[in-house]
Structure formats: structure tokens, C-alpha cells
């Protein structure tokens, strides 16, 4: 399969991550899909934000789980960006799916380290509400969370995020019934890619921002290349 280009947290250079502005721009740029992160607010709403702490990207301080959606909405979510993004607020999962639902691939990462009570059930319900099960993959570094998803809804595709190189990642994923490996790009060598495909696993790689790495990974026929720079990835793919 031809490698598809996926915008990481939106994946648009110069745009604040995980905002509706970045997802709209990713769609406009022709991204094949997007990746983004979900967590729960104090009142149980699914919000799209990467860090558990709001301090890096928002105009407040502390854990996202200690604020209600209304309280989070009162803050800015584009702290380090210019006035053109001032109106951006933390988006809900529903708002992001409304923007990206026509893309061919949607990767929702469950940031479930804390963990969040019933995050899996809530995400599955929203994906079903939008009827996006077929083109969605749920990923997480919390592999218990992925196993829970598989029990709740066996047909939902899940991808195991790995930060470091395991001895045998393909067997690890296969034995647990996962559908995909989401590897740090430094660990996605030719042997792993071939073995994953031989075993029927999808092989997706994050977060690829360097042109040389992009070219190498396109040559290895990985399935999805997750990048912060969709435009650069298309340039390298079409060279
Ligand atoms: O899903 C790939 C990548 O997003 C995982 O790392 O920290 O950027 O969420 P992180
Ligand atoms: Ca992520």
C-alpha cells in the first residue's frame, strides 16, 4: 500500500497543535488523515489536548482533569502563537470529528496514563455516533486501555504505541490482538516493517519531520507516516 500522510496533532507548520484551525488547514492541504490526543475534563467531556498539564499550550495552569469544559473554554489554547489564533479554544472530540470526518484515516490517541474513568467507552460511543468506525484507529501507550477497547468492541482497530524498541514488537502486538504498531520512527527498520506486514499488522510511524527520514520511510512502504509538517511530507513523497 502507498504510504499515507497523517497530520500529527493537525500537523501544520505554524499552526497551534490540536486546534480546529490546524485540523481545518490539514484538510485544506490534502492530508490523508490526522492524529490527535484525547483526555477527559473534570465534568467528563472528551477534550482534544496533548499534555495532561495545560501549562505548555494554554493560558492556565494545572491538570486538564481538574477543570470543567466550560472552565477550559475560558482559556486560550494557542499561548505561543500570534493574534490570528487568539480565538481558538480547546476542542471537543465531536468538534474535531466534524472537521476531519471526510478524511480517509483518523487516529485518535487515548492519553490514558492517569488513567481516565471510562475514556474508552466514551470515545467508542462518539466514533459510533459519527459512524466513523471503519476509518478510525485508536492508539495508546497504555496497552491495557487498548485491550479493554478490543473487549468492548472487537472490530475497532487499535494500534500499540511504542516509544522504545522492543525485542519483538510484532509478536508482542500480534499476541495481544492489536491491529497495528505505532512506532517511533527511529525504530522502524526494514525488518520490522516486513515482519509486521507478513503478520497482517499495519505499521505506522511517528513523528517524522526530517526530510531524509521521510524519504527512507516512504521507501520502506510503511502504512501511515505521522508528521508535524504535512506539506514537507508531500514534497518528499513526490520527489
Ligand atoms: O501517535 C503518535 C504520537 O503522537 C505519539 O506521541 O507524545 O506526540 O502523543 P505524542
Ligand atoms: Ca499523540
Image: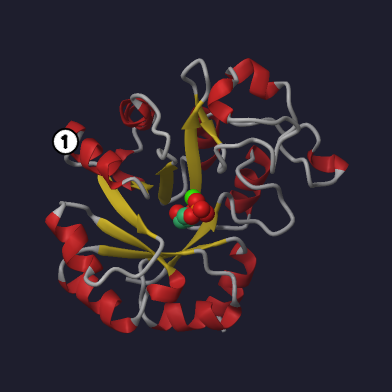
* In front of the other: 96 or 186: 186
Q: Which residue is mark 1?
A: 151
In this view, 218 is above or below 76 = below
> In this image, 160 relative to 151: left or right?
right
In this view, 33 is above or below 168 = above
Q: Position of residue 81 (x, y in %)?
A: 80, 47
> In this image, 48 relative to 83: left or right?
left
Is any part of residue 62 visible from this angle? Answer: yes
In this view, 69 is above or below 152 = above
Label 1 CB less than 8 angstroms from ligand 1: no
Image quarter of residue 162: bottom left
> In this image, 127 relative to 90: left or right?
left
Is any part of residue 33 visible from this angle? Answer: no
The residue drawn where x is 24% and y is 78% is: 194
Q: Position of residue 138 (x, y in %)?
A: 35, 45
In this view, 118 is above or below 193 = above
Q: Secondary structure at mark 1?
A: helix
- Packing grade of label 1 (10 A; few <14, some 14-19, many >=20) is few
Image quarter of residue 78: top right
The residue drawn where x is 26% and y is 42% is: 144
The residue drawn where x is 15% and y is 51% is: 177
Q: Position of residue 61 (x, y in %)?
A: 69, 31
Image quarter of residue 163: bottom left
Q: Position of residue 57 (x, y in %)?
A: 69, 41
Position of the C terminus, as image quadrant, is bottom right
Position of the N terminus, as image quadrant, is bottom left
Amino acid at each position: 500500500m502507498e504510504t499515507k500522510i497523517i497530520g500529527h496533532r493537525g500537523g501544520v507548520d505554524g499552526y497551534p497543535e490540536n486546534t480546529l484551525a490546524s485540523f481545518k488547514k490539514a484538510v485544506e492541504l490534502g492530508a490523508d488523515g490526522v492524529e490527535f490526543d484525547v483526555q477527559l475534563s473534570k465534568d467528563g467531556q472528551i477534550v482534544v489536548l496533548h499534555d495532561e498539564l495545560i501549562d505548555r499550550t494554554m493560558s492556565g495552569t494545572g491538570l486538564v482533569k481538574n477543570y470543567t469544559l466550560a472552565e477550559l473554554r475560558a482559556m486560550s489554547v494557542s499561548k505561543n502563537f500570534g493574534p490570528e489564533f487568539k480565538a481558538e479554544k480547546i476542542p471537543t472530540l465531536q468538534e474535531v470529528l466534524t472537521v476531519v470526518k471526510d478524511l480517509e484515516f483518523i487516529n485518535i490517541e487515548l492519553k490514558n496514563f492517569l488513567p481516565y474513568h471510562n475514556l474508552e467507552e466514551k470515545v467508542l460511543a462518539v466514533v459510533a455516533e459519527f459512524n466513523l468506525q471503519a476509518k478510525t484507529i485508536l492508539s495508546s501507550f497504555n496497552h491495557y486501555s487498548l485491550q479493554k477497547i478490543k473487549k468492548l468492541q472487537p472490530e475497532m482497530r487499535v494500534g500499540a504505541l511504542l516509544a522504545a524498541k522492543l525485542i519483538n514488537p510484532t509478536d508482542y502486538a500480534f499476541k495481544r490482538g492489536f491491529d497495528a504498531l505505532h512506532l517511533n520512527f527511529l525504530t522502524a527498520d526494514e525488518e520490522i516493517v516486513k515482519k509486521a506486514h507478513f503478520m497482517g499488522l499495519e505499521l505506522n510511524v511517528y513523528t517524522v519531520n526530517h526530510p531524509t527520514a521521510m524519504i527512507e520511510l516512504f521507501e520502506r512502504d510503511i502504512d501511515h507516516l505521522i508528521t508535524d509538517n504535512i506539506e514537507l511530507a508531500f514534497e518528499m513523497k513526490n520527489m
